[in-house]
Structure formats: C-alpha cells, structure tokens
C-alpha cells in the first residue's frame, strides 16, 4: 500500500503543515485528508502543487508500507 509521507519532508525542510496548506491553496478539508492518508485518490494537479511547494518529485512523497491484510496473508 502507498502512503503519503509529507510530514517527513516537512521536517527535513523545516516547514509546517500550515505553510504547506497555504502553498497548495487546497481546501483545508481536502488538504487534511490528503496529509492524513484518508483519501483513495489524488488529482494530478494536487500532486503537482505538493511537489512544487516541497521542491520534490512524486517518488519523494510516497512510501510503500505493508498493510495488515498483506501481513496476515503472508503468515498463513
């Protein structure tokens, strides 16, 4: 499963979530859901806004993590 790892990038750059929210010009609800991985899709436009603000590539924004379903299937 892919997850957005924006908090790590913000920490590395010494920036806050509030700063990023202002840079992206997203509604707060959409921004908050995106940052907290409570969304199932991301518009390319919003992905580009995040990358521009954080001066990174999409690869930098995401981490791959195992979810509980994948872990339990492997243990059987």
Image: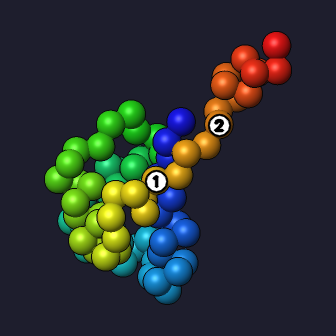
Mark 1 surroundings within 10 Å by alpha-carbon count, few (fewer than 14), some (14 through 19), many (20 or more): some
Task: Name the foreground residue: 15 vs 55.
Answer: 55
Circle 1 SS class: strand
Examine the rendering and report whether any part of residue 27 can be seen: no
Picture residue at 48% right of the left edge, 72% below the top: 9
From what the image shows, is residue 67 above or below residue 60? above
Q: Is residue 5 left or right of residue 67?
A: left
Q: Quadrant of residue 67?
A: top right
Residue 30, x across and y down, in percent: 32, 49
Picture residue at 40% right of the left edge, 57% below the top: 59
Mark 2 surroundings within 10 Å by alpha-carbon count, few (fewer than 14), some (14 through 19), many (20 or more): few
From what the image shows, is residue 11 above or below residue 27? below
Q: Residue furthest bottom?
A: 14
Q: Is residue 22 left or right of residue 36?
A: left
Q: Is residue 10 left or right of residue 34?
A: right
Task: Name the foreground residue: 17 vs 45.
Answer: 45
Residue 64, x across and y down, in percent: 55, 45
Residue 13, x across and y down, in percent: 46, 83
Evaluate if marks 1 and 2 touch, with contact meaning CB atoms under 8 Å apart: no
Q: Quadrant of residue 40?
A: top left
The residue beneath circle 1 is 62
Q: Residue furthest top?
A: 76
Picture residue at 40% right of the left edge, 38% below the top: 39
Q: Residue furthest right?
A: 75
Q: CA distance from mark 1 to mark 2?
A: 13 Å
Picture residue at 72% right of the left edge, 17% below the top: 73
The residue beneath circle 2 is 66
């Amino acid at each position: 499963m892919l997850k957005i790892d924006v908090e790590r990038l913000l920490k590395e750059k010494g920036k806050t979530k509030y700063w990023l929210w202002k840079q992206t010009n997203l509604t707060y609800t959409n921004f908050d859901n995106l940052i907290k991985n409570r969304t199932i899709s991301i518009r390319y436009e919003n992905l580009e806004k995040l990358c521009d603000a954080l001066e990174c590539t999409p690869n930098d924004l995401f981490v791959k993590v195992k979810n509980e379903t994948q872990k339990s299937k492997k243990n059987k």
